[in-house]
Amino acid sequence: MVLLWGRIRKNNKHKASKVVEELVTPNHFWCPISLDMMKDPVTLSTGITYDRESIEKWFENGNYTCPVTNQIVTNFDLIPNHTLRIMIQEWCVQNQKHGVERIPTPRIPISPFEVAEVLLHVKALTSRLDPYGCLELVQRIEKWGAESERNRRCIVENGAANVLASAFDAFANDSNERNVSVLDQILSCLNWMFPLQFEAQKSLGSMASLHCLVWFLKQQDLSKKEKSIVVLKELLSFGDEQNMKALVEIEGVNEILLQFLNKRVFSTPTITKASLSVVWYLVSSSNSEKIKLSFVELGLVSSILDILIDSERNLCEKALAIFDSLCSSDEGRKEAYDNALTIPLLIKKLFRVSALGTDYSVSSIWKLCKFEERDEGKVLVEALQVGAFQKLLLVLQVGCDDKTKVKATELLKMMNPYRAGVECIDSDFKNLKRSN
C-alpha cells in the first residue's frame, strides 16, 4: 500500500508547484481485517498476525476461524508480535517528516488472574475497613480500565462490580466523611461497569449506600454529583420498589433532584439527563401518589415545562413522560392548568421529539381535557387556537399505537363542538418564554 504526501518546490520562474510523491508502506504493516496500520500486532496460532483490537472484535462477534486462512482456531491465545511492532514504530519515526505519527508502545492487557487477585485484596481490606489500602487498589482498577476497552471487559467479567459495590456499602456504613476518597473512587469505577448484577444492586440499595449516594449529591463538587446520580439512575432502572421507597424517604432527596432539573441552577448535561430518569422511575412506580404530590408541591410541573422549551430531543422525551405521569393526579393537572405554557408546549412537541414523545403529548392533552372541572371547555378552546385539531388529525393519518389512537380520536370528538368561531393562531410558538 502507498501513502500520498505533497511537497512544494519552486521552478526557475519562482512559481510554486506541488509535487505529489508516493510513500510506500510495507504490506505486512497492515491488519488484514481493518486494513489499517497495526498498533498492537498479535499472532494467532495459525501464524497470521492481526491488530489486537480487530481480531478480538472478530472473535467477540462469534467467529471461530482465522480470517485469512479460514482455519478453525482452537487456541485463542494472542501472542504479541514485538518484532513487527518495533519495525512499524521505527518506520514511523523515519517518515515523521512526511506527517507519519509514531505508534505508541501498547500496554500489556491485564489477565483474569490479575483482576481476581486485586479483588481478593479489596475484599480483605474492606473487611478491615482500611480505606487507604482499598483506595490504592481501586485506583489501580481505574487505571487498568482507562488503558483499554479490553481491560474494562476483563474487569467487569470477573465480578469487580459486585466486590466494589459491597465495599461501598461497608465504607458508607462506617463513615461518609472519613472514607470519602475511597467511596468517590469506587463510584468512578462503577460508572463504567453497567449493567449491575443483582449482588451489586443489593449492596447499593442498602440504606447506608443510598444515604451515601444522596450525601454525594449534596456536595459542591459537580464530579461527585454526576457519578452519584448516574449510579442512582442505574440502580432504579431495575424497578426495585424497595429501593425507590427507601430513596424517597431520605430527607431532602426530592429537593435535590428538582434543583438538578431547574435550568437556572448550574448543572451538567449528564446530571440533568440522569436526574430526569431518576424522577421518571419515582413518579411512575406503583404507589407513587405521595411521590407525585411531593414533586408537584416543589414545582416540578413548572421545571418540566422549562425543559420542554428548548432542550434536546432525548431530554424532552423524558420530560414529556414525567409530565404525562404528573397529569394523572389532580394536583398535577391543577398546576398544569395554571401555567400558560402547558397547552402550547404540548401541541408544539407533537412530531418534534419522537414517536414516544408524541404519545406522551397526546396522553397529557387528553388527561387535561378529559378531567377538566373548572371552566369546562377552556382547555379545548385553547388547544384549538394553537392548532391541536390539525395535528391530531395528522397523528391518526401517520399512524400511532392503539392507545394514542383512541385518545386522539376522543380529543377530536371533544373539540369538534368548539371549532365554530375559533380561529387558529400561529402554532410555531417561536417566541415562547420561560415562566417566572
Image: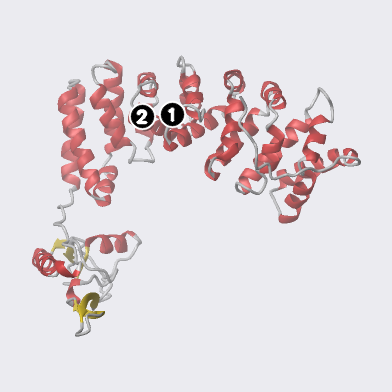
Q: Are marks 1 and 2 in contact (CB under 8 Å)?
A: yes
Q: Is residue 347 visible?
A: yes
The quadrant of the picture occupied by the N terminus is bottom left
Which residue is tagged 2? 222
Q: Name the residue at 20% across, 46% down.
A: 112
* Element on which disc 1 rests: loop
Asked which secondary structure carries label 2, the reply is helix
For badge 1, the amino acid type reads: Phe
In three-dimensional space, the C-alpha distance between marks 1 and 2, rounded to whole angstroms, equals 9 Å
- Nearest to N terminus: mark 1 or mark 2: 2
* Type of amino acid under label 2: Leu
Choose between 148 and 79: the one closer to the eye.
148
Rendered image quadrant of residue 35: bottom left
Residue 355 drawn at (x, y percent): 63, 49
In percent of the image, x 70 and y 29: which residue is there?
A: 340
144 vs 93: above or below: above
State whether residue 246 is above or below residue 155: above
Q: Nearer the viewer, residue 330 or 14?
A: 14
Name the image quarter holding the C terminus: top right
Is residue 286 something that shows in the picture? no
Q: What residue is disc 1 on?
A: 266
User: Where residue 119 sits: x, y (%)?
Assistant: 20, 35
Left or right, 367 with respect to 417, comes to left
Q: Image point 47% across, 28% down: which residue?
A: 260
Residue 300 at x, y percent in the picture: 58, 25
How busy is the neighbourhood of tag 2: few (under 14 within 10 Å), some, or many (20 plus)? some
Q: For this view, does 32 lie left or right of residue 26?
A: right
